[in-house]
Image: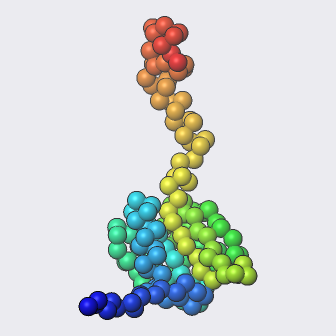
């Protein structure tokens, strides 16, 4: 005789009125996929979640960048002027419905934004000078063939 299985499925709905409970499982997955980078999310009508170190640390989270993304319905790459991520580059994008309206926003710390290309190039030049020269080889006594 075959045993009956419980086919009840857990559901989490992403909508304009999603709660932090609805958002948390998806955001924990994104947090994990991003190697533990802090993530935030909220729906249009309700505060959401802030996740760090594998845990939901705020179940009523909102922030000015999440709110701005919802208002503008556009992705933003900024350094917030305040809040827990003040001065840290973040990327926040809208979650849109079938008609293209922003019904939520998801944010992540932008590790690519931490490195300013001009600063990186300047530091590279300084390091090359410190270790022995202007060229690609740190030792001027090496033959040209080893400088590649």
Compared with 148, 124 (above or below) is below
Residue visible at 69% across and 81% down?
98
Q: Furthest residue to the front?
A: 1
Residue visible at 48% across and 13% down?
146
Q: Could one spot residue 71 in this view of the protein?
A: no
Nearer-the-camera pick, 120 or 142 = 142
In percent of width and height, residue 13 lies at 52, 87
Q: In this figure, which colouring scheme has been used for the structure?
A: rainbow
Question: Image quarter for residue 101?
Answer: bottom right
Q: For the N terminus, which image quadrant? A: bottom left
Nearer-the-camera pick, 64 or 82 = 64
Left or right of 54 on screen, residue 23: right
Compared with 80, 3 (above or below) is below
In percent of width and height, residue 68 lies at 64, 76
Residue visible at 34% across and 67% down?
53
Question: Image quarter for residue 59?
Answer: bottom left
Total label count? 0
In percent of width and height, residue 96 lies at 66, 78
Q: Could one spot residue 2 in this view of the protein?
A: yes
Residue visible at 46% across and 76% down?
26
Compared with 147, 47 (above or below) is below
Left or right of 36 on screen, residue 145: right
Question: Image quarter for residue 113?
Answer: bottom right
Q: Furthest residue to the left?
A: 1
């Amino acid at each position: 005789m075959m045993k009956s299985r419980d086919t009840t499925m857990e559901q989490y709905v992403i909508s304009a009125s999603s709660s932090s409970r609805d958002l948390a499982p998806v955001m924990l997955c994104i947090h994990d996929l991003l190697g533990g980078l802090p993530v935030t999310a909220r729906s249009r009508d309700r505060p959401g979640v802030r996740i760090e170190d594998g845990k939901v640390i705020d179940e009523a989270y909102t922030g000015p960048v999440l709110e701005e993304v919802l208002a503008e319905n556009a992705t933003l790459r900024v350094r917030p002027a305040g809040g827990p991520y003040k001065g840290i580059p973040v990327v926040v994008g809208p979650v849109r419905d079938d008609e293209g309206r922003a019904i939520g926003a998801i944010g992540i710390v932008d590790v690519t934004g931490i490195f300013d290309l001009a600063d990186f190039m300047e530091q590279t030049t300084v390091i090359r000078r410190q270790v022995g020269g202007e060229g690609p080889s740190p030792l001027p006594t090496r033959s040209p063939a080893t400088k590649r």
